[in-house]
Amino acid sequence: MEAFLRSSPKLAEVAGTLAPRTTADAATVTTVALVAAAFLLREYTWDRPDQYRHLWYERPQDDGGLGPAKQRATRNIARRLEELNKDAVVFWGSQSGTAESLGARLGRELQQRFHLDTLVADLSDFDPASIAEIPRHKVAVFVLSTYGDGDPSDNAAEFFDWFRRQAMDKANSHARPLGSLRYAAFGLGNSHYQHYNRIVDVVTEALQQLGAERLLDTGKADDALGTTEEDYVSWKEVLFSRLCQDLHLQEHPVTYEPVLSVIPDSSLEPIDLYIDEPVHSSDSRSSTNKNTPNTPIHYLPIRSARQLCSSSVSSPSEAQSGCLHMDIDLADHPQLRYKTGDHLAIWPTNPAQEVKRLLDMLDLSEQGKRDQPLLIKSLDPTVKVKVPTPTTIDALLRHHLEICAPVPRDTIRRLAEFAPTTRARDFLLDVGRRKDAYLAFTSVTHVTLGRLLEHALTMGADAAAHGEPAAAWTRLPLSFVLEALPRLQPRYYSISSSSIVSPRMPSLTVGISSTRLMTETQTPVEIPGLATGFLRDKATLLEQGPVSVFAHVRQSKFKLPALASTPLVMVAAGTGLAPFRAFIQERLRLHNIDNGGNSKPVGRMMLFFGCQSPERDYLYGDEMLEMQRQLGDKLSIVTAFSRAGDPAADDGDDKVSLPRGKTYVQHRIAEHADAVAEMLSDGASLYICGRASMAREVGKAVTSAVASSKRWDAQEPRAWLQGLKRSRKWQEDVWG
Ligand SMILES: Cc1cc2nc3c(=O)[nH]c(=O)nc-3n(C[C@H](O)[C@H](O)[C@H](O)COP(=O)(O)O)c2cc1C
């Protein structure tokens, strides 16, 4: 250094000027050097980036914690299959998740049993026209549910419209645009609805017309018979045999291969985890959907709850043990609004004893195990993680997975691989393989996953011969449980208050229903419905202090006509009364507006309401009578009491012969056929709310009332009905 400075006098002069002369100078130079070194070594020796840093930033974004945000992939399905090197695609169109989970299961089985690389695809992620480009050596499967009034699910709406348009255009040409497509289709529906499985029917008819080749008869599930799962399994078995026979695919023995990886990660803090907060799924049914927009989910206080009736509607398989009225407070959420006729979605929590049972069976009950932070990742980039992550197993079982639903036969068979004893394995294989054994077992046992695992463990009597009997399913991978259980869905209730009368306090009318099971020992067991049991417990807790629920508003199309003077015919049974209470409240408010001595003219309303008896379950009976008193001849209420001794059934003017004591709303409509027909020809809007089977009978009664008043032939009522539905003068809000 010295030699170098001697060779350059100028540099030596600069170095001499800069050289520290005092202790303070030396300290300053050292500090500057240390700071510079620390800066340069940042991220190497200190302040290393957190490998989970992306997670902190992922949460507030639109992904909702459901895994990596959606990549911007091509909307051309043929190109996507090529890119991913897939041999088959299973498209699903689903509203409440059943078709979605069957589609996912089918995709997995095609992969495992036939080594057919399969993409499971949300229909809304692809451009419908690109289906025509799928080459002949690939297979397309459609799993489609029917919803609303014979409508497609939201995520299938665009696809469905495209098919209908194509089929109509095709009528004028001989082209076969789908000539290279080989497909199979399965529909999910409920025969209580007027348009049973309409979507799969329309789509497959269009596919045929457009030249696609069907591999096997279209399968259909009927939820009314409770056979959706069995219908699917039977159809799937035929599909698999066709794949072997016609496409010469080879079937391989199946062993479980995880699609998800579940990684314990103790570095995560509780604050970073999704615990009880539900999230909208990131698919097309989310809040971004334009067809049925959902508001964000909020934690809303239940302001009050009261029992409306405690009756019990008995059928061999169902019971209703009362009905609750609840007021939900929106005061703290000014941005959250609802409109008369909308739905409130309640996000229930699974019952604690069912969560505990499953945790016990998985040997995860200990605090350290149940609260262990878990990262859940998809091992297949085309499969979305359906639950929020990072989280804990306790949170997943409590808030995010449907653990109270019956376990499908297929899943029981696949569980056998992990059975803790040979007796348990044999039992699961028997029930899983034989439909009659499954039906016999499920008819006397409430087969949730926890109960099934428990039941199979008790079959481990042979374990004594091999040492200690098994206490838990320690070999069952957590990924299997997460893949097998569907995502917990919110439950929708029609709001029973008017947004004009009660804008910040929507009310709900909740029928507390349960399924009745006769056990092997002939003891009847009531299994409460998940959400109704949850809300009943919340109502009880409200007596001790404040209680809140996670909920969101879903916009509905079940709306009052724009003009208050339009007459209304409303038909309801049971809790189907909910939206009509709101409608009448709203009309009453308009009627009572003091407009310089003249109240606002509201149209005439006729409400047909069916329940068991006036004493038992005439919901809001006094309130209805009071509204009728105030509205005078603007509101007539016609009741139909289905139980013997119904005094209203004997009011002397029956025009049709009724079985005594079994009067339903459709009978009352038949009695009042002239009045109904007259109101409809005066431009009345007709609304039906309640069970689908009731809506179907009401539809027939109204159509025949109008047809006989107008002396129509067989074809005219159909066209008339379609016209009314198109112009939204006939609306239904019904459930299975
Ligand atoms: C509000 C509502 C409306 C429905 N409308 C129909 C219908 O018009 N026709 C039909 O066949 N099934 C109908 N269903 C039955 C569904 O198709 C059936 O429950 C199916 O399993 C739902 O599948 P998903 O969960 O994939 O949407 C309806 C169900 C609900 C809850």
Image: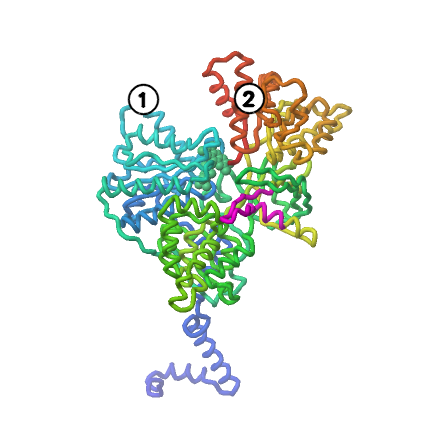
Residue reaching furthest top?
711
Tag 2 near tag 1, CB within 8 Å: no
Mark 2 residue type: Val
Q: Which of the 4 image quarters holds residue 218?
A: top left
Q: Please, is residue 7 above or below residue 418 in the view?
A: below
| Position in image of residue 535 (x %, y %) | 61, 47
Mark 1 residue type: Asn
Q: Distance between the residues labelled 2 and 1?
A: 37 Å
Q: Name the residue under label 1.
A: 172
Relative depth, front residue between 293 and 633: 633
Q: Residues within 10 Å of mark 1 (few under 14, many from 20)?
A: few
Query: Which color scheme is applied?
Result: rainbow
Residue 410 falls within the magenta-colored stretch: no
Residue 359 falls left or right of residue 589: left
The answer to whether residue 296 is visible is no
Residue 357 falls left or right of residue 433: right
Relative depth, front residue between 678 and 68: 678
| Position in image of residue 155 (x %, y %) | 43, 39
- SS category of the residue bearing label 2: helix
Q: Is mark 2 within 8 Å of ligand 1?
A: no
Magenta stretch bounds: 512-537
Q: Earlier in the sequence, mark 2 or mark 1?
A: 1
- Mark on residue 702? 2
Q: Quadrant of the N terminus?
A: bottom left
- SS category of the residue bearing label 1: loop
Q: Please, is residue 560 above or below residue 522 in the view?
A: above
The answer to whether residue 412 is visible is yes
- Mark on residue 325? none
| Position in image of residue 358 (x %, y %) | 49, 57
